[in-house]
Image: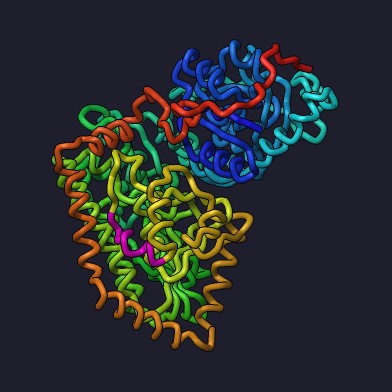
C-alpha cells in the first residue's frame, strides 16, 4: 500500500515504522504536521491508501480523516485517552500497558479500534519505554491493522467501536479511561515526604519531555535523568532535597530514605535546554565534593563499600566495567543520556578503554547503553559553550580519540554490541570494533548530513570502505534515511543482527563473546588483526585519514557556511518544523508524477 506518515517529528517510533514498513514492501512518504493546509496538500500529492499518524500533538483535520482512512497510533491501552498516556501509567505504577491503533474521528482517541498490543511495564523512564516496549508493540499493532485494510475495503471486516470494547474488553484486556493532560502540579515532588521510589517515578514519567519543575540551589529548573543512589558517609543527617555531591555530570540529592542522582536539568535564561546538571549549575556544583565510583564493579569486583553481600554493585555511574567468571571477556558499558557524548564523556570513555587494555581478557565487548549505543558529539553542551565552534572542535577530536583507542587495541578481539540505536559518529565508532552486532530492533543512521551537511570524522573514511567498499560507502553516506539492523547486516555495514528483546540480545552477546574467547584459533585471529592494522598503517596512516576529515570539519565549524550552527541551534532548542525535509517528503519531489489509480476519495465509513 501507499502510506503517508503524518507525524509531529521523525522520532524513534516513526523511524522504526518507516524502516520496517518500507521493508514490508509498502510505499512510504512522510509529512510533518505543521498545519492543516500543509497536511492536506501532502495527501493530495501522495494519494495514500492509508494515512498513518504515529506521533501527533494535535488532532488530524476532518478534511483528511473523512476522506482517507487515517489510523492513529496511541501509546495507551484500549480506552485510554488523552495526551499523557505513559506519564500516568508510570506515575500510577501500572504493571502492564499497551499501544492501540484506532481510526481518526472527530473526538480524539475515541475512534473504532483496529488493533491493540499490550506489554509488561519496566521500571524505566518514559523515553526508554517509548523507544523499546512502546515501539515494539506499535509495530505489531500497526502491521495487524494494515493487514485488515483489504478486508475492510471489501466490507468483510470492520473495526470495533470503542464503546463496545469498553463494555466487553475481552482479548483487549482491562480497559483504560480518559485522563487529562498531566500538569506540573501533578508531577510536583514533596522532598519532605516523597521517598526515593516516588521521586524516581515522577521524574521518570516526565523524562524526555517536559521534565519535573523544581528548584535547585534556590533557582527554578526542570529535572530529568534520575537514578537511585545512596548518601555518602557523613551525610546521614542531610535534609531531604539537599544536594550532597557530584559525579559524571550529575548531582546527588538527599531524599527522606536515601538519595538519588539528577543527571540533567533544564534551567531558564541563557541556555533553556537540557544540560548535565553540573554544567547547568557549574558554580554551585564546583563547591560540592566529587564522589567518584570505581569503574570495575559487579560480580564482586567493586570495592566492598559499593557492593552488597551477594557481590552485586549497582551504584550509578555512566561507565561500568565487568568481566566474565573466567575473566576471558570484559564488558564495558557507557550509558550516556540520549547517546550524546561530550568532550568530557569521550575523555572518560577513552580512559576506560585504557583500563580495559590493562586487564588480562581476550575479548572486549563495548555495550554502550540500553537505549542508545552512541549518537556522536554532544550538541547541547556544544550549544552552551562560550564558543560552540571551539567546543565542536574539541568534541570531535575527543570522539576521534575514542575511535583511535579502539582501533589500536590490537592485542585482543573487540566487539561493539548495539542494544540501542546509533547515529552519526556513534555508528562509525562501532565500526572501529572487529565485530559489530546489533539487536534486531536497532535503528542506525550512519550519516552526518542531516546536521547542517556535516562532513563527519571518527575515521569513517577508513572504516566504511573497508567494510562495504567505496561505492557502497558513498551511497550509505548519501542516504539520509534510517537503516534497520538487519538491513545493515545484509549490506555488510555490520556483522549480525539478532535477539528478540534486550535480555535475549544481552544473553546471546555474552554467549558469542565467550565462544570467541574460547576459540582455538583466537591467538591466530589476534595476530592477523595486528598484521592487518600494521599493513593498513603502512599504506596510509590513521593520522592522515583524521587530518583529511578534520580539514573538512573545520570548514563546517569555522567556515563561511553557517548551516551546521543553524541546524544545531534548532535541534537543541527543539524549534517547530517549518517544512518537511525532501528526503522524507517524497511526494514533494518535482518529478513526483508516476501514474497510479487514486485511492477512494469518498467519506470513510465507520462501524
Question: Which quadrant, please, contains the N terminus?
Answer: top right
Question: Which quadrant, please, contains the C terminus?
Answer: top right
The residue sitting at 70% across, 12% down in the picture is 602
Choose top left, top right, bottom left or bottom right for residue 524.
bottom left
The residue sitting at 77% across, 30% down in the picture is 150
The residue sitting at 45% across, 76% down in the picture is 363
User: How was the colour assigned to the protein in this rendering?
Assistant: rainbow
In the image, taking residue 181 as reference, residue 346 lies left or right, namely left
Residue 514 seen from this side: yes
State the predominant SS element of the stretch in magenta: helix
Q: Position of residue 75 (x, y in %)?
A: 60, 32
Camera-nearest residue between 39 and 76:
39
Q: Magenta stretch containing residue 30, yes or no? A: no
The residue sitting at 63% across, 38% down in the picture is 26
Choose top left, top right, bottom left or bottom right for residue 413.
bottom left
In the image, taking residue 580 as reference, residue 124 lies left or right, namely right
Camera-nearest residue between 552 and 186:
552
Q: Position of residue 388 (x, y in %)?
A: 18, 41
Does 137 appear above or below 184?
Answer: below
Q: Position of residue 457 (x, y in %)?
A: 28, 55
Q: Position of residue 196 (x, y in %)?
A: 46, 43
Camera-nearest residue between 58 and 431:
431
Does 587 appear above or below 277?
Answer: above
Q: Which residues are magenta?
A: 457-466
Q: Magenta stretch containing residue 463, yes or no? A: yes
Does 361 appear above or below 451?
Answer: below
Does 69 appear above or below 327?
Answer: above
Amino acid at each position: 500500500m501507499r502510506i503517508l506518515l503524518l507525524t509531529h517529528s521523525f522520532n524513534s517510533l516513526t523511524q522504526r515504522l518507516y524502516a520496517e514498513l518500507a521493508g514490508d514492501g509498502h510505499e512510504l512518504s512522510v509529512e510533518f504536521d505543521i498545519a492543516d493546509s500543509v497536511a492536506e496538500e501532502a495527501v493530495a500529492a501522495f494519494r495514500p491508501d492509508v494515512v498513518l499518524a504515529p506521533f501527533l500533538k494535535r488532532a488530524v483535520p476532518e478534511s483528511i480523516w473523512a476522506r482517507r482512512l487515517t489510523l492513529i497510533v496511541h501509546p495507551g491501552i484500549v480506552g485510554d485517552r488523552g495526551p499523557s498516556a505513559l506519564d500516568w501509567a508510570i506515575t500510577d505504577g501500572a504493571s502492564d500497558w499497551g499501544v492501540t491503533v484506532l481510526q481518526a474521528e472527530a473526538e480524539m482517541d475515541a475512534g473504532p479500534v483496529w488493533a491493540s498490543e499490550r506489554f509488561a511495564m519496566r521500571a524505566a523512564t518514559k523515553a526508554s519505554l517509548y523507544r523499546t516496549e512502546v515501539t515494539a508493540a506499535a509495530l505489531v499493532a500497526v502491521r495487524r491493522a494494515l493487514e485488515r485494510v483489504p478486508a475492510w475495503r471489501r466490507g468483510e471486516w470492520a473495526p470495533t467501536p470503542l464503546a463496545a470494547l469498553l463494555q466487553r474488553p475481552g482479548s483487549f484486556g482491562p480497559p483504560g479511561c480518559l485522563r487529562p493532560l498531566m500538569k506540573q502540579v501533578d508531577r510536583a515532588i514533596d522532598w519532605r515526604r516523597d521517598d526515593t521510589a516516588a521521586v524516581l517515578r515522577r521524574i521518570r514519567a516526565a523524562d524526555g519531555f517536559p521534565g519535573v519543575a523544581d528548584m535547585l540551589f534556590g533557582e527554578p529548573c526542570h529535572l530529568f535523568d534520575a537514578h537511585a543512589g545512596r548518601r555518602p558517609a557523613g551525610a546521614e543527617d542531610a535534609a531531604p532535597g539537599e544536594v550532597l555531591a557530584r559525579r559524571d555530570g550529575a548531582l546527588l540529592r538527599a531524599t527522606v530514605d536515601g538519595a538519588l542522582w539528577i543527571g540533567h536539568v533544564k534551567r531558564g535564561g541563557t541556555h533553556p535546554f537540557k544540560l548535565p546538571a553540573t554544567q547547568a549549575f557549574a558554580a554551585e556544583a564546583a563547591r560540592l565534593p566529587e564522589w567518584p565510583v570505581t569503574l570495575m564493579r559487579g560480580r564482586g569486583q567493586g570495592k566492598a563499600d559499593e557492593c552488597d553481600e551477594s557481590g552485586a554493585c549497582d551504584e550509578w555511574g555512566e561507565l561500568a566495567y565487568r568481566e566474565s567468571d573466567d575473566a576471558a571477556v570484559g564488558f564495558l558499558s557507557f550509558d550516556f543520556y540520549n547517546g550524546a557524548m561530550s568532550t568530557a564523556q569521550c575523555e572518560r570513555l577513552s580512559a576506560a578503554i585504557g583500563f580495559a587494555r590493562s586487564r588480562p581478557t581476550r575479548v572486549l565487548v563495548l555495550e554502550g547503553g540500553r537505549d542508545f549505543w552512541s549518537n556522536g558529539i554532544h550538541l547541547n553542551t556544544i550549544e552552551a559553550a562560550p564558543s560552540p565552534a571551539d567546543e565542536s572542535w574539541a568534541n570531535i577530536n575527543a570522539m576521534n580519540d575514542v575511535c583511535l583507542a579502539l582501533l589500536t587495541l590490537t592485542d585482543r578481539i573487540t566487539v561493539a554490541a548495539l542494544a540501542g540505536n546509533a547515529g552519526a559518529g556513534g555508528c562509525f565508532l562501532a565500526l572501529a570494533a572487529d565485530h559489530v552486532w546489533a539487536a534486531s530492533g536497532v535503528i542506525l543512521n550512519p550519516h552526518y548530513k542531516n546536521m547542517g551537511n556535516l562532513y563527519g570524522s571518527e575515521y569513517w573514511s577508513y572504516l566504511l570502505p573497508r567494510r562495504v567498499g567505496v561505492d557502497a560507502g558513498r551511497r550509505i553516506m548519501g542516504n539520509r534515511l534510517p537503516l534497520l539492523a538487519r538491513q545493515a547486516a545484509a549490506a555488510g555495514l555490520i556483522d549480525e543482527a539478532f535477539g528478540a528483546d534486550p535480555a535475549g540480545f544481552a544473553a546471546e552477546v555474552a554467549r558469542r563473546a565467550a565462544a570467541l574467547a574460547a576459540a582455538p584459533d583466537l591467538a591466530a585471529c589476534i595476530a592477523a588483526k595486528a598484521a592487518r592494522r600494521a599493513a593498513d598503517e603502512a599504506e596510509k596512516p590513521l593520522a592522515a585519514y583524521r587530518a583529511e576529515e578534520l580539514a573538512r570539519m573545520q570548514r563546517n565549524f569555522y567556515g563561511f557556511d553557517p548551516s551546521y550552527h543553524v541546524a544545531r541551534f534548532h535541534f537543541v532548542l527543539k524549534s517547530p518544523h517549518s517544512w518537511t525535509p525532501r528526503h522524507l517528503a517524497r511526494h514533494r519531489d518535482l518529478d513526483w508524477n508516476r501514474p497510479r489509480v487514486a485511492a477512494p476519495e469518498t467519506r470513510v465509513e465507520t462501524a
